[in-house]
Image (spheres, rainbow, N blue to C red):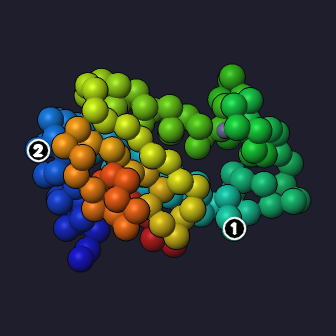
Amino acid sequence: MSYSNYRAEFIKMMLAEGMNQWQAERLLYYSTRLDRLATAMCNGDYPCDNGQRKTKQCSKCDMGYAPESLNKYGVCPECRSQYNVEQILGGVGSGFEAIFSGDPRGCVLKIKVPSGRTNDWGREGICVPSSFNP
Ligand SMILES: [Zn+2]
């Protein structure tokens, strides 16, 4: 299946759980962003630490990032994306929960939904597709 099929299927499932279109699309956006960052972390690509680049520790997760990628509170792009996902889910209502994974080979973002439906191997939640394809 192509990304656009996975995307359409994800949106359909989220709408059935009570989420709106905008919320589902924002989760897709952040999944792609988190996937790209997890891959950068593994490969030492910008803005992550590669042992040579000048880095500064994130004030939240302590991982090293290029200083200019941290916000004014010293928080890295990954922590900011995770925070934004939590905010979206908080706005949807109870029964939704984010499951983050830093492993770009799998699903970096899954959503636990009120119905308990899952589509991942671990039966934890619904995988949020990512369009990042290095
Ligand atoms: Zn961080």
In whole angstroms, how far apart are the C-alphas of marks 2 and 1?
A: 37 Å
Locate ligand 1 by image quadrant: top right
Closer to the camera, 109 or 84? 109
Count of labels in the image: 2
Residue 36, position as x, y percentages in the image:
53, 58
Number of other residues with Cα within 10 Å of mark 2, as a class: few under 14, some 14 to 19, many 20 or more: few
Secondary structure under the numbered disc 2 in the rendered image: helix
Q: Is residue 99 left or right of residue 20?
A: right
Q: Earlier in the sequence, mark 2 or mark 1?
A: 2
| Disc number for residue 43 | 1
Residue 125 versus residue 24 in the image, above or below: below
On residue 16, which mark appears? 2
Residue at point 50%, 39% (across, down): 81
Residue 28 drawn above or below residue 8? above
Q: Which mark is residue 28?
A: none
Image x and y of residue 1, in percent: 24, 77
**Kind of residue at badge 1:** Asn
Quarter residue 16 falls in: top left
Question: Can see residue 33?
Answer: no
**Residue sitting nearer the eye, 108 or 78:** 108
Residue at 75% from the left image edge and 44% from the top image edge? 63
Query: For residue 115, what is the image quadrant?
Result: top left
Q: Say whether residue 39 is left or right of residue 17.
A: right
Q: Secondary structure at mark 1?
A: helix
Residue type, mark 2 in image: Ala
x, y percent for residue 107: 44, 61
Tell me: 28 left or right of 33.
left
